[in-house]
Image (spheres, grey):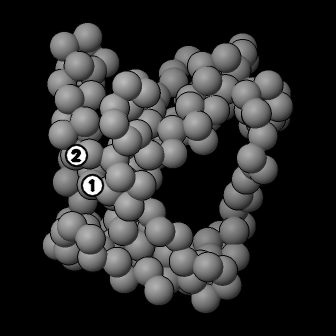
Amino acid sequence: SKWFHDEHNSDVTVYTFPRWGVAKLTAAYELLLAKLNIDGLIVMDGGTDSLMDGTEFECGTICEDYTSMFAAHLAQSKTLRHRMHCVLGLGVDRFHHTSDVSSWRAIAELKLSGGFLGSISLMDRMSGVQQYRKCCQFCHEYMQPSIVGTSIMDAIEGRFGDYKSNP
């Protein structure tokens, strides 16, 4: 919220949630859906471990991702028309031992089932990427840098493998 104000002179409310279970998170989503008259709900994963089905040798930190996904699926609202799950940062979950092969397998299965809507690449020259970088740098001044956030920035710069700019 402070970054939006300082960077864009815009007052934006940012909603965050504790590490609740599905029932409490569903209730929180429903409260916001009703309060803000929202018609679309997007669940974002900073990596790709949320695509795992649990049978992989290592599947990252899917419990947190699944909680958000289940809550978004269960949330009810008169205005909600669209739900989407979006993953960002193929390879980011290598930190949690998630295999890129497992990620590609999951994407192929989504494609076969009609659930894969496409992909894009994040490039340095994109305005949104530049804003993301500024926002992350701003946040790092106030809190511990995010492993996922810095891994995404590292990947955008062309870093690969076990490279970690996160101190």
- Of the residues under marks 1 and 2, which one precedes in the sequence? 1
Could you say which quadrant of the image residue 79 lies in?
top right
Kind of element beneath mark 2: helix
Q: Are marks 1 and 2 in contact (CB under 8 Å)?
A: yes
Where residue 139 appears, as percent x and y from the top left, is 59, 78
Relative to residue 22, is residue 15 depicted above or below?
A: below
Q: Residue at x 38, y 61 (%)?
A: 95
Towards the viewer: 73 or 37 = 73
Question: At label 2, which amino acid type do we have?
Answer: Asp
Residue at the disc numbered 1: 91
Where's residue 36, x and y in %? 75, 37
Name which quarter of the figure residue 27 lies in: top right
Q: Which mark, residue 100? A: 2
Q: Secondary structure at mark 1?
A: loop
* Left or right, residue 158 beside residue 94: left
- The N terminus - image quarter: bottom right
Q: Is residue 34 visible?
A: no
Left or right: where does residue 70 sit relative to residue 53?
right
Give the vertical position of 165 relative to 34 (above or below): below
Nearer the observer, 16 or 7: 16
The residue lying at 69 percent from left, 76 percent from top is 2
Looking at this view, is 76 or 127 the one in front?
A: 76
